Amino acid sequence: MAAECGIDDCGVLAVGRCRDCRTAFCMSHQGRNPATGDGYAALCEPCAARRHAAAGTDRTTGESARDVGPVQRLGDDQRWIMSGQAVRDLTTKGVAALPVIEQRRRTVKLRFGGERVEIDEIEVGTLWLAGRFEWTRPVEGVAETREWNTGLLAEPRGGYPVAAFRHAVARCRVTELGATLVRDGGAELEARAVPLIAQAVRRLLR
């Protein structure tokens, strides 16, 4: 049976379960990143508000009242990624990127009847591997957070600039041929990973 939102006895179909209070929540009661507006995969609205208050975070800017300087620098890094300038800088400097490989299946008819399936590996883009960072996805109704190889996409869907940081990056598996994107759906990049990824991409330029 599908879980129902337990915030204020809402009762609407839940989209996740809070890691802090273990209460199921719907989209209306999902916690959101105040800087980007992205929903947290495993935080309800009340618990997200408590975390922001404890960190001294301004809800409109996402900046910390106690430590404005460093947070602003991380915001600059975030905009550097989202605008596409990071990709332009990496390309200009000639930093090597990994090809993004997709498998395409096609059916081939045999000469004497019958058919067989052949798998072609096609290069569909490129990315720069930033490292391993935390993503959260629902697994059997429970939020699971784990580290994944994460890459900066050279050409995200719709191109740059992107509306949210998560649109510029993707989970991937690295093989001897390049990288394959993980597309099992429902995964959300952890907010604390955003500045770490931006810093890792800057290190690629050194």
Image (spheres, helix red, strand yellow):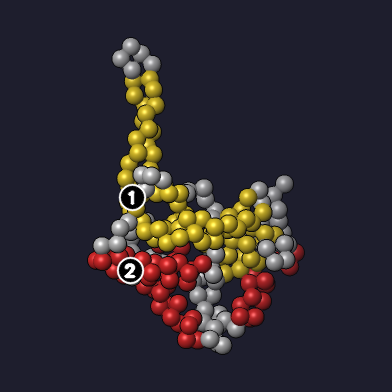
Name the residue that disc number 1 marks.
99
Farthest residue in the right direction?
Answer: 9
Which one is in front, 127 or 204?
A: 204
Whether residue 143 is visible, yes or no, is yes
- What's the residue at 63%, 81% (across, down)? 53
Callout 2: SS: loop
Q: Is residue 19 left or right of residue 205?
A: right
- What's the residue at 54%, 83% (across, down)? 64
Farthest residue in the top direction?
Answer: 112
| Image height of 80 relative to 130, above or below | below
- Alpha-carbon span between mark 2 and mark 1: 19 Å
The spot of residue 203 in percent (x, y) is 38, 69
Hey, what amino acid is under mark 1?
Answer: Pro
The spot of residue 183 in percent (x, y) is 48, 48
Q: Is residue 29 left or right of residue 189?
A: right
Hey, what amino acid is under mark 2?
Answer: Leu
Farthest residue in the front direction?
Answer: 206
Callout 1: SS: strand
| Image height of 106 relative to 169, above or below | above
The spot of residue 34 in percent (x, y) is 54, 75
- What's the residue at 45%, 66% (across, down)? 197
> Which mark is in front, 2 or 1?
2
Name the residue that disc number 2 marks.
205
